[in-house]
Amino acid sequence: MKLRKNVAVIGAQWGDEGKGKLVDLLCEEFDVVARYQGGHNAGHTVKFADQHFALRLIPSGIIHRDKLCLLGNGMVIDPEALLDEIERLRAAGIVIEENLKISDAAHVILPYHRALDLAREEAAGLARIGTTGRGIGPAYESKVARYGIRVADLLDPEVLKHKIEFACAEKNPVLQIVYGRETFDPAQLYDAYLKYGEVLAERITNGTVLINDQIRAGKRVMFEGAQGMMLDIDHGTYPFVTSSNTIVGGVCTGLGVAPKHIHEVIGVAKAYTTRVGGGAFPTELNDEQGEHLRSRGNEFGTVTGRPRRCGWLDLPVVRTAAMLNGIDTIALTKLDVLDEFEEIPVCVEYNVHGEKWKTFPAFAVAHDDYKPVYRTFKGWKQSTVGITSFDDLPQAAKDYIKFIEDETEAKASIISTGPRREETIVRD
Ligand code: IMP
């Protein structure tokens, strides 16, 4: 499969589509792998040679020795989580030296962000978002409020001290009075975060200049998305979303890369649908079929271990992803999870109060107001696990894939038939 020069890999559903495997599979051809949004709420799983790598902050390209990996300015970074991930990867034999860089303009997650995230979720009761509890939302809030701490600030003792004191003066009363939680000692935070700065100093760089220099030098870049299009802060199922732009537009802002440098978009979609956390999920299955998808697909969160909600493939979702991201190619993952079903329904549109919707409505609609309209496919009832050639797939599986291609107007050039790198069909 011939890919154009710089390629973005984007989640076309609610996250957990298998982007990690894709990036790992394709990044052989690339020189740089860069993340542009999110933080350690992401969980990318890569399985290779009997080793299992769970990546949260670091781009999946790190498994390959000669790839330059960049954490972009659009990310929110918890230094403790980053150092822990570096240690875990090193213990598994992965080399992390000059190949990992951090943008000085990325924002830092501090413990009060985590505490606020957890306190709010608890206080929200049934209306909770179901966040990963990593402080992602509150860290982006600090950024947008313009008093966030940036990675560069970790290297400037005076600025760091002032910013931590300023933030604690506001966050502590909110934590204590509004939520009845413990507060944070600014002096202790300052000591800890100054040390993180010292340890990370050699990796901190002007990420925008770095990536644009690489592009100018003719290097090939892969832009690695985290979460999925439906969790985008502007275009997703707000308020049940994450706090960043997960769609391809986020590449431009989250790395400082001009649109003309993004040459191809791969949308990663599971052959069915999953979601973690609250919010609308029109094709959700709360029965033994959903349980079958969960157990056969091992649908449990990489970060939190939470069971994922499971349902049939939702084409309005994938169509919306194709529209928002300009998807050129679909990577269809976990096809083998559908192997045992007698029949496989696919949602082709919604009926929302009598109106037909082929894409996901941007306005908030209560979960019960979406009536999925299904077309049912015959199951193939045979194993597709590990198949590497499209021709070897059962006819019913080919029909299923063809329908998805027709409905989304994008070719499924990559089809994943198992968690391993080699369990993949790559078509021309
Ligand atoms: P947050 O990003 O931790 O604020 O969580 C907001 C919503 O995004 C919750 O529904 C999470 O379950 C969801 N979410 C965040 N990261 C991921 C991910 O990597 N995969 C799937 N869902 C995610």
Image (cartoon, rainbow, N blue to C red):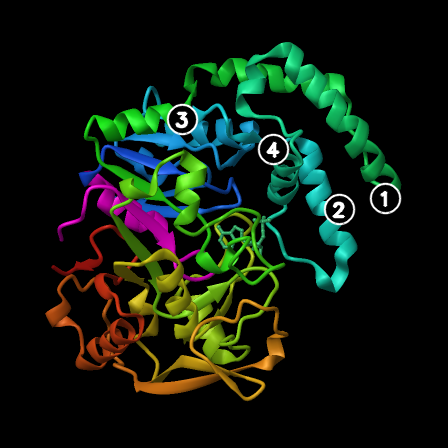
Badge 2 crowding class, 10 Å Cα cut-off, few under 14, some 14 to 19, many 20 or more, is: some
Query: Which residue appears at 66% of the width and 10% of the height?
Result: 158
Q: Is residue 61 left or right of residue 428?
A: right
Can you identify the residue that label 1 sits on?
Answer: 178
- Nearer mark to the viewer, of 4 and 3: 3
> Spatial distance from mark 4 to mark 3, Cα to Cα?
18 Å
> Spatial distance from mark 2 to mark 1, Cα to Cα?
9 Å
> Spatial distance from mark 4 to mark 2, Cα to Cα?
16 Å
Q: Which residues are magenta?
A: 1-28
Q: Which mark is residue 207?
A: 3
Above or below for 42 versus 113: below
Asked if residue 265 can be seen in this view, the reply is: yes
Residue type, label 4: Ile
Q: Check whether the beta carbons of the residues at disc 2 and disc 1 lie within 8 A of each other.
A: yes
Of the pair 102 and 218, the residue shown nearer to us: 218
Query: Which residue appears at 58% of the width and 15% of the height?
Result: 195
Asked if residue 66 can be seen in this view, the reply is: no
Badge 1 crowding class, 10 Å Cα cut-off, few under 14, some 14 to 19, many 20 or more, is: few
Residue type, label 2: Ala
Q: Is residue 34 magenta?
A: no
- For marks 4 and 3, the one nearer the N-term is 4
Can you identify the residue that label 2 sits on?
Answer: 119
SS at mark 2 in the image: helix
Residue type, label 3: Gly
Can you identify the residue that label 4 sits on?
Answer: 109
Q: Is residue 18 magenta?
A: yes
Q: Is residue 90 left or right of residue 428?
A: right
Of the pair 336 and 210, the residue shown nearer to us: 210
Rendering coords of residue 381 (x, y %): 27, 81
